[in-house]
Image: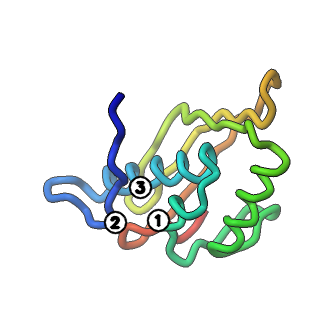
């Protein structure tokens, strides 16, 4: 079984900014939404303005949301169906299931990055 090393905030030589931003968001999403591991996900956060009215801004807002998921929906899982990149933006088409056996929801998550950090969601 192979394990992927965490994505570095430093952009590897030869990699485009869009590729790097995509890798950051994908690793962040897995650590935050699927593993519900704030410590692992928080390394990717900048200012982190949250545009979801049900979650607070900043790293502490994300921490609170992940604690809510752990408590209320511990088996929730998000599957990324498509990824789009455009400059500093990474857009995810996601199928999220909060409780096993339910239909789930289709979600579009839009992230804006700056200098390898997630600034807006």
Which callout, 3 or 1, points at the residue further toward the start of the chain? 3
Residue at 45 percent across and 49 percent down: it is 27
Badge 1 density bin: few <14, some 14–19, many ≥20, Cα 10 Å: many
Real-space Cα distance between discs 2 and 3? 8 Å
Which callout, 1 or 2, points at the residue further toward the start of the chain? 2
x and y percent of residue 66 in the render?
A: 71, 57
Real-space Cα distance between discs 3 and 1? 7 Å
Q: Is the residue under label 2 in contact with that under label 1 (CB below 8 Å)?
A: yes
Instruction: Return the residue found at the far bottom.
Output: 47
Q: Can you tell which mark lies on residue 94? A: none
Q: Can you tell which mark lies on residue 9? A: 2
Secondary structure under the numbered disc 1 in the rendered image: helix
Residue 33 shown left or right of residue 87 in the figure: right
Q: Identify which residue, 15 or 58, lies in the foreground.
A: 58
Residue picked out by circle 1: 44
Q: Is the residue under label 3 in contact with that under label 2 (CB below 8 Å)?
A: yes
Residue picked out by circle 3: 24
Badge 2 density bin: few <14, some 14–19, many ≥20, Cα 10 Å: some
Secondary structure under the numbered disc 3 in the rendered image: helix
Residue at 34 percent across and 42 percent down: it is 4
Q: Determine whether 26 is above or below 114 in the image.
A: above
Q: Identify which residue, 70 or 118, lies in the foreground.
A: 70
């Amino acid at each position: 079984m192979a394990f992927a090393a965490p994505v570095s905030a430093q952009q590897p030589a030869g990699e485009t900014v869009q590729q790097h931003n995509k890798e950051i968001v994908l690793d962040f999403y897995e650590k935050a939404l699927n593993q519900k591991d704030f410590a692992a996900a928080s390394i990717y956060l900048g200012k982190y303005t949250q545009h979801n009215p049900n979650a607070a801004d900043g790293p502490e807002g994300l921490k609170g949301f992940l604690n809510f998921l752990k408590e209320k929906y511990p088996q929730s899982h998000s599957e990324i169906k498509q990824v789009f990149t455009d400059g500093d933006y990474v857009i995810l088409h996601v199928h999220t299931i909060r409780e096993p056996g339910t239909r789930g929801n289709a979600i579009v998550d839009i992230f804006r990055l700056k200098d390898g950090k997630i600034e807006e969601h």
